Amino acid sequence: MPRLTSRHGTSPFIWCAAIICALISIVVIFGGIVVFVGYMVIHPRVPILSVADAHLDLLKYDIVGVMQTQLTIVIRAENDNAKANALFDENEFKLSYEGKPIAILKADRFEVDKERSIYNHYLVQSYPIPLSPTMMQAIDFAVKQDVITFELKGGSKTRWRVGPLGSVKFECNLSCELRFRPSDHIYIPSPCTSAHKN
């Protein structure tokens, strides 16, 4: 009894799809190798954010339990990379007192050249802030001790621009306390940085 055989050729559409997928895979692999080699050659360091200086311009509070304050905060954006510029984006920081938000500090996207730093000055002026009894006790104690503390939290999304090699992304975050002397409004310096240098 004769055997029936069936021969079906592969569709040209399947061949085209396979070739396109193979080409995309090669491009992705090659691109990954190029970025990796570029990273190893350039060996970029993570950009650093830090509080460079600050000043307590105004501090007022009354027996009703309302506080007004104004601060100047200088944040330094540092790029230690010798071969790549750094882009700082989505720059946002929250200033608070005893857990109560006072202000949001924002800056537009900016770029820091190789082995350079940029200083951003933020003038923080609060609206009248109602204080709870606990916060009133805290501010009374701070004035008596001549040290008042504010909390600063936030950061930037950074990336290195490495020409045709693409970019490497990181986040720089700050979480620190800013201390001032109410008697003369002077900032008491303390370490406040997103990273430690190597």
Image (cartoon, rainbow, N blue to C red):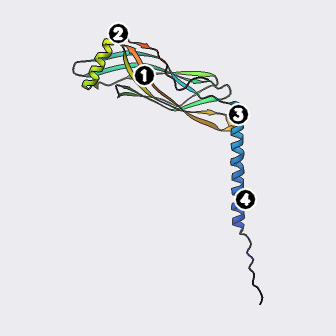
Dot 1 lies on which element?
Answer: strand
Q: Residues within 10 Å of mark 2 (few under 14, many from 20)?
A: few
Marks 1/3 in contact by CB < 8 Å: the verdict is no
Residue 55 coordinates in the image, percent (x, y): 42, 15
Quadrant into which the C terminus falls: top right
Question: Between marks 2 and 3, how big is the CA–CA gap?
Answer: 52 Å
SS assignment at label 3 = helix
Q: Residue furthest bottom?
A: 1
Residue that carries the numbered disc 2 in the rendered image:
183
Image quarter of residue 178: top left
- The residue that disc 3 covers is 40
Mark identifier at residue 55:
none
Alpha-carbon distance for marks 1 and 3? 36 Å
Q: Earlier in the sequence, mark 4 or mark 1?
A: 4
What type is the residue that disc 3 sits on?
A: Met
> Of helix, strand and loop, which one carries label 4?
helix
Q: Residue at x 38, y 15 (%)?
A: 57
Dot 4 or dot 3, earlier in sequence? 4
* Mark-to-mark CA distance, 4 and 1: 58 Å
Query: Which of the two labelled residues, at mark 1 and mark 2, occupies the earlier sequence position?
Result: 1
Counting from the top left corner in percent of width and height, residue 41 is at 72, 32
Q: Give the alpha-carbon distance from disc 4 to disc 3, as whole Å.
A: 32 Å
Residue at the spot of label 1:
177
As drawn, the residue found furthest toward the top would be 184
Name the residue located 36 percent from the left edge and 14 percent from the top edge.
147
Residue 186, percent from left and from top? 41, 11
- Which residue type does callout 4 highlight? Ile
Q: Are marks 1 and 2 in contact (CB under 8 Å)?
A: no
Disc 3 residue crowd, few under 14, some 14–19, many 20+, Cα 10 Å: few
Residue at image position (72%, 67%) is 12
Viewer-nearest of labels 4 and 3?
3
Q: Secondary structure at mark 2?
A: loop
